[in-house]
């Protein structure tokens, strides 16, 4: 599971596949299980609603299925031995046979490559959109030739999924989930998740209500990325059973756990998660007190209007979306907690990254109003 480079003077070193297994057919989701959201990004990201009581093992199986098709490569002196073709293919030499190897490259990996060589990814996207791929190639390859950086290339099937520094610590989703399974209270059950070859987002909830008579359920949200899209983190998460809204709340010292994929090992993660989870009961009590306080804090129409205007400006919401939030106010009540619930319900209409941004904003808003 750790880097195992092929020794020698070759330009490219192939890293062994960290975890291989035959693809399983254990993970099955029906259309009924899916939370349908409006697709606004290039890549569809849908939260899967989980009803299987053994959701954690199901999630691990899915992660291992993805890992089965993944490989890693070190490209030494990348400026000499790697290039982009038609702004969509990554070409480099393999250590084993010195023949050229070509992969497709994801949008995210292309943006990572641009960052490594100091080229604006927005400019490259503009070239691609204008069908000037030759210009994109010229810019990328010209600047590639000026670098001698070693690169970690992470692939899935026939596509580059990540272009990273060799300082990046390979600690992937299957191993992360195995440790979480060991350390997390078994009463936590997987509620919903998103997973692909680039990222993991999973939400676990307890079989209890945060406040008696309310529909809020406490939980933990776990995020990670095998290609550096985000840090490895655990956050407090509150799930509304009635409308399936989610709210990410940071209290006290902040998140339960957060760590970059630099210098991390499975042993580090296991120990740090164990210590972090000891803080969970105290942090949940703080969230409970916060919810009770904000539920009782009534807002008049002028206050609601000012807050929603602030939300619109800071989140860059459209007029149509803002009107939809206002229309939801009678459903949740004219109090601070109700207003944040309006916002998190609207968040369900966006793809995952945007949804999480709005849910985090709502959690912060809850604390400052």
Image (spheres, rainbow, N blue to C red):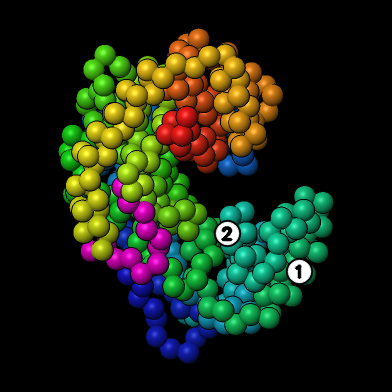
Q: Quadrant of residue 17?
A: bottom left
Q: Quadrant of residue 53?
A: top left
Report the span colored magenta.
256-267
**Coordinates of residue 352 in the picture (x, y in percent):** 51, 38
Q: Residue at x 55, y 38 (%)?
A: 354
Is residue 135 toward the left or the right of residue 365 in the image?
Answer: right
Label 1 Cα neighbours within 10 Å, binned few <14 / some 14-19 / many ≥20: some
Q: State which quarter of the image contains the N terminus.
A: bottom left
- Name the residue nearer the viewer: 223 or 24: 223
Q: Is residue 181 above or below residue 78?
A: above
**Coordinates of residue 268 in the picture (x, y in percent):** 26, 63
Q: Which mark is residue 139?
A: 1
Q: Residue at x 34, y 29 (%)?
A: 290
User: Is residue 258 one of those drawn in magenta?
Assistant: yes
User: Is residue 311 one of those drawn in magenta?
Assistant: no
Mark closest to the chain's N terminus, 2 or 1: 2
Q: Which residue is mark 2?
A: 109
Residue 87 in sight in this render:
no
Q: CA distance from mark 2 to mark 1?
A: 16 Å
Is residue 90 toward the left or the right of residue 261 in the image?
Answer: right
- Name the residue nearer the viewer: 113 or 25: 113
Label 2 Cα neighbours within 10 Å, binned few <14 / some 14-19 / many ≥20: many
**Coordinates of residue 187 in the picture (x, y in percent):** 18, 34
Residue 113 in sight in this render:
yes
Mark 1, secondary structure of its residue: helix
Q: Is residue 369 above or below residue 270?
A: above
């Amino acid at each position: 599971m750790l880097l195992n480079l092929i020794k020698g003077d070759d330009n490219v070193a192939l890293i062994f596949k960290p975890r291989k297994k035959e693809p399983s057919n254990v993970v099955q989701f029906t259309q009924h299980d899916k939370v349908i959201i409006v697709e606004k990004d290039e890549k569809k990201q849908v939260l899967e609603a989980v009803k299987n009581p053994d959701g954690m093992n199901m999630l691990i199986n899915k992660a291992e299925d993805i890992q089965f098709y993944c490989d890693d490569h070190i490209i030494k002196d990348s400026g000499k031995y790697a290039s982009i073709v038609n702004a969509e293919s990554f070409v480099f030499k393999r250590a084993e046979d010195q023949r050229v190897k070509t992969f497709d490259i994801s949008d995210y990996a292309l943006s990572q490559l641009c960052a490594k060589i100091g080229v604006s990814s927005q400019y490259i996207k503009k070239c691609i959109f204008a069908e000037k791929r030759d210009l994109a190639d010229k810019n990328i390859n010209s600047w590639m030739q000026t670098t001698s950086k070693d690169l970690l290339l992470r692939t899935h099937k026939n596509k580059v999924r990540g272009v990273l520094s060799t300082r990046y610590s390979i600690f992937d989703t299957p191993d992360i989930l195995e440790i979480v399974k060991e350390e997390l209270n078994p009463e936590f059950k997987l509620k919903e998740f998103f997973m692909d070859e680039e990222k993991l987002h999973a939400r676990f909830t307890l079989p209890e209500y945060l406040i008696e008579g309310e529909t809020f359920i406490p939980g933990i949200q776990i995020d990670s990325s095998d290609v550096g899209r985000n840090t490895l983190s655990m956050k407090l998460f509150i799930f509304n059973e009635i409308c399936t809204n989610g709210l990410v709340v940071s209290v006290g010292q902040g998140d339960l756990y957060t760590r970059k994929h630099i210098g991390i090992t499975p042993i580090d993660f296991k120990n740090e998660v164990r210590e972090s989870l000891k803080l969970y009961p105290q942090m949940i009590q703080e969230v409970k007190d916060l919810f009770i306080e904000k539920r009782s804090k009534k807002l008049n129409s002028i206050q609601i209007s000012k807050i929603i205007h602030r939300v619109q400006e800071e989140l860059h919401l459209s007029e149509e979306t803002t009107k939809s939030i206002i229309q939801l106010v009678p459903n949740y009540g004219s109090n601070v907690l109700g207003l944040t619930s309006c916002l998190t319900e609207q968040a369900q209409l966006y793809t995952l990254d945007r949804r999480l941004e709005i849910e985090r904003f709502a959690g912060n808003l809850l604390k400052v109003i």
